[in-house]
Image (tube, grey):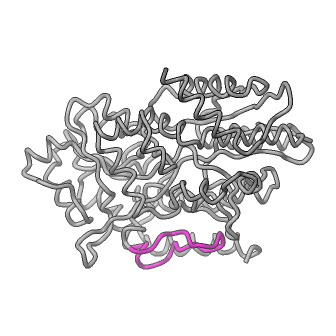
Amino acid sequence: MRKVLFLVALFVLLTSAGVMAQDGITIEFYFPTAVDAPINEIIQGYADQFHELHPDITVVPTYTGSYTQTRDTIRTELNGGGAGPDVAVMLTTDLYSFIDEGTIVPAQDYIDALEDPEAFVSDIFPAFLANSKDEEGTIWSLPFQRSTVILYYNADLLSEAGIENAPTNRDELLAAAQALTLPNGERWGLLVPFAGGFPIWVFQPFAIGNGRNITGEAPTTVYMNDPQVIDALDFATKLGTEYAVGPAGGSVWGDTPTAFLNGQAAMIIHTTGTMTNLLNNATFNVGAAFVPMGLPNDEGVGYGTVTGGGNTYIFNPPGAERSPEELEAAWLWSEFLASPEIQSDWGAATGYIAARASAWELDPLAARAAEHPQYLVARDQLAYAAAEFTSYRAIDTQNIINATLSSVISGAATDAAAAMASAQEQIDALLEEYR
């Protein structure tokens, strides 16, 4: 009965704009994953449900590895003269690269054709729209598997150490981490996954909490050599050196949740997308809290986090010659994945944050959040979330940032200010033509 009601609700939702596709359309859908969940099975289930609603449209999901592998696969296909996918889940930070290459179409055109475009957009959390729009406010992609960086903690260990509440600023965080660290690496007080090639995402909350995001409102503005950013980097580096509450250079992304579950770490910084995995597999009480990486403000808190994850992009590269009906079918699939019903199911199944406010009023997410209020912490932290780093020449600029952060945090570069100044100079040179 629940499935029937679910499908009826979605049919009404997706046909409300009066958009119908021609017979026999196949949608090639590429998707990555970065969390521990049966993603292939879940996505195929959504494709089957969508086909029941639209028998003339068949979605063919293809798992394409990591976000980077997915992006590289698509660009290789397009550069070779191929059509690429019809729809793909890509990092929100890839937006300007694909706009610049002219391979995607804006979702705004289809949103404007809805019966109530304003209601559709206003139901999406503003924090998740920040990386969905260009600088003129046009929405190009729809939030799907969205996340933020969050603090997880072993509530049992904190209680044993006499720590009554989760830390609210970086001073409290350091004190708790030092109290929870055991010698000789037996247990780390705090693991931050800087190691592995993309420290930019987990570093941004340090900078945001400290008062200065490294990305500006315009895709040509970057703040690498800002004093607040350098101070944040100094604190991040010292966690593994002077303070020794985690390994020098940070932990590895994929190993961090495992270490937490195995009792090798009392607290970790990770994605909200791993929440379901942690709650399902922990043998202790898992706490979730806003990321407290900033110095205490007037209220005593130093919260700040960054959004992340992937949006759905509709591809129509030069030479693909996709018909209007095919593009409309691609939009229907993208809209389906962004619907409150799917976002509710997806959030409960994976831990990604449902991007639609109304999704939180629907089961299974409403029931899941009632049982595990940690999900609500992830949602409510959006009030302190800032945009993920993006810019023109995003791949090149992020490579510079990641290499610089890695060199400083690992100890290879000992002068953080000089390293960040050099990175700023390189990025400014890359972006000069867009200013």
On the rendered structure, is 325 left or right of 3?
A: right
Residue 74 image-quadrant placement? top right
Residue 80 is at least partly visible in this image: yes
Magenta segment: does it hold 213? yes
Q: Is residue 31 above or below residue 235?
A: above
Residue 399 is at least partly visible in this image: no
Instruction: Tell me where residue 282 appears, x and y as whole percent.
Output: 26, 31
Residue at left 25%, top 79%?
Answer: 298
Q: Quadrant of the C terminus?
A: bottom right
On the rendered structure, is 148 left or right of 172?
A: right
Residue at left 51%, top 38%?
Answer: 34
Q: Is residue 96 above or below residue 234?
A: above
Instruction: Tell me where residue 75 appears, x and y as whole percent.
Output: 76, 44
Q: Is residue 361 above or below residue 204?
A: above
Instruction: Tell me where residue 308 appears, x and y as whole percent.
Output: 51, 52
Residue at left 13%, top 53%?
Answer: 179
Instruction: Tell me where residue 259 appears, x and y as whole percent.
Output: 30, 36
Magenta segment: does it hold 426? no
Q: Nearer the viewer, residue 303 or 434?
A: 303
**Total tally of numbered discs in the picture:** 0
Residue 315 image-quadrant placement? top right
What secondary structure is the magenta-colored segment mainly?
A: loop
Task: Point out the stretch of residues depicted in magenta.
Answer: 211-230
Q: Nearer the viewer, residue 379 or 185?
A: 379
